[in-house]
Image (cartoon, rainbow, N blue to C red):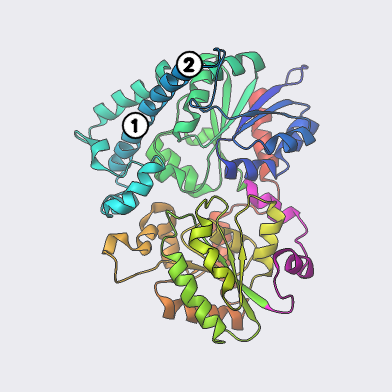
Amino acid sequence: MSAVDPKIVVILPSPLMARNFLQTDALQILTRDMHAAVTVISPNPDDRETAARYGAIWYPYFHPRRSHGDGPYGAISWIARMTRYMRYLAGLFIHMCLTYRINTISDFQGFKTRLRQSWHLRKTYLREGLPMSKIFGFPFSRCRGIYHFLYRLYYSRWQSFAPVEKLLSELQPDLIILSMLQTHMITPYALAARHLKIRVLGINGSWDQPTTKGPICPGIERIVVQNDIVLKELVRYHHFPAEKISIIGWLQMDAFSQINTIGREELSQRIGLPSPQRFILFAANAPRLGLHEPVVFRQLAALAAAGAFGDDVVLLCRCHPQDRQWEARWGWARNLKNVVLEAPELGPLDHLASLISHASVVIASAGSINLDAIALDTPTIGLAWEDASLPYHNRHARAYDLEHLAELRTSSGIAIVHDMDELTAACKRYLANRTEDASERAALRQRYLYLLDGQAATRLVNEARKMLA
């Protein structure tokens, strides 16, 4: 490493990714131990305070519709922003074409299943930038020549944006730490880094991204990943060299291993939970993946109110942190007997860890919170709901066709349930014995979570050190 303190820019395009990074030791190690001048770029203005606490600078994430650039305000500025935004949306369309094609070429079964779902469901995916229409594969969706042409077109300079280039030119970083390497949101930053010849260390966003989110952007020198499964997927499907990938574990799991979980009494006061009682944590998903959940929860609450799980058991419904429709979807649950409703929040990870640690069992639908429960050795149930009133491919159980979830269907470390009878039986089994399936959960921890030693952030920073040496 040079005698001059290094300059590092950390780019975190989603609120959840920003939370998972900023609530670990990563930023503190970068600023304190490496003496790096760190700039954090994220979408949440609340991150400014967190960055400042560790001596870092915060900038808002670029969005072409909101950024004024250097132009004057008024009509000219509005036209410039809209023109920029149309260019950005055109790029999003091509990225969706690329994602459709790489998913088809790779023969991902989860993608095939989603394409067979009704238009009503696929519209939701489309609004989130997922290519759930055959139009994105027209023509010849398996043609590698067309795929490579679109790849070169998309990652050409026309998806560069002046405000991003200007900021990185002013900051002059020695290294960019870039997360979510397969999303359209990071393309302007990746292109600017390549144009300005800035080295890039990538963070794989989550366990599902290699098999759902499209191609890896060019210019990434090294990637850190959660586990060996993700490493092999990046090599097999994205042809990224294995020697340039390092396994560090899950950043957010550092917080789980380092923090002192909140005591039961304090937790009960914080969320209005009757302190002597046990509770089942129902961790709701976002609307796209949790359309079935309110109906399931209402039935589960009726059973709890009737004493099916014992008089000392309460249901705690935790709304998904990014569920903007939570009032309409879950507000009614406030009035149910033996139910506590927690509004969505991107709060401290110690609160989430405490909820999971003190729960008798965690119920979730095809989400990473099942892995959080496994990390903390809490029994967990996966809802793979087979609602016979729905067309086969519309049923939530098809979410477990996705590659990153498929292996869990046959694991005994998580109870996969398909209807209310199975869910009730699994709840009763874990309420009777919280240590049930503990050895199987340990096997899943080893398979999916790498080293739960609180050092994932340290391993990430060590990769940055190597690149700056």
For the residues labelled 1 and 2, the Cα–Cα distance comes to: 27 Å
The disc, 1 or 2, on the residue closer to the chain's N-terminal end is 2
Q: Residue at x 71, y 75 (%)?
A: 274
In which quarter of the view is residue 37 placed?
A: top right
Residue 256 lies in the magenta-colored region: yes
Q: How many marks?
A: 2
Residue 201 lies in the magenta-colored region: no
Residue 75: mark: 2
In the rendered view, tell whether residue 374 sits above or below residue 191.
Answer: below
Image quadrant containing the C terminus? top right
Q: Amino acid under label 2?
A: Ala
Name the spot of residue 24 as percent of width and height, x first.
Answer: 70, 44
| Residue in front for this viewpoint, 129 or 460 | 129
Dot in front, 1 or 2: 2
Q: Residue at x 39, y 24 (%)?
A: 86
Is there any visible trace of residue 453 in the rendered image?
Answer: no
For the magenta stretch, what is the residue range?
A: 251-277
In which quarter of the view is residue 408 placed?
A: bottom left
In the rendered view, tell whether residue 383 sits above or below residue 179.
Answer: below
Mark 2, other Cα within 10 Å: few <14 / some 14–19 / many ≥20: few
Name the spot of residue 328 as percent of width and height, x first.
Answer: 49, 59
The extreme front residue here reads: 74
In the rendered view, tell whether residue 378 sits above or below residue 15.
Answer: below
| Residue in front for this viewpoint, 54 or 200 | 54
Q: Residue at x 71, y 34 (%)?
A: 48
Q: Amino acid under label 1?
A: Phe
**Residue under circle 1?**
93
Image quadrant containing the N terminus? top right
In which quarter of the view is residue 407 placed?
A: bottom left
Left of 434 or right of it: where is 135?
Answer: left
Left of 292 or right of it: where is 111?
Answer: left
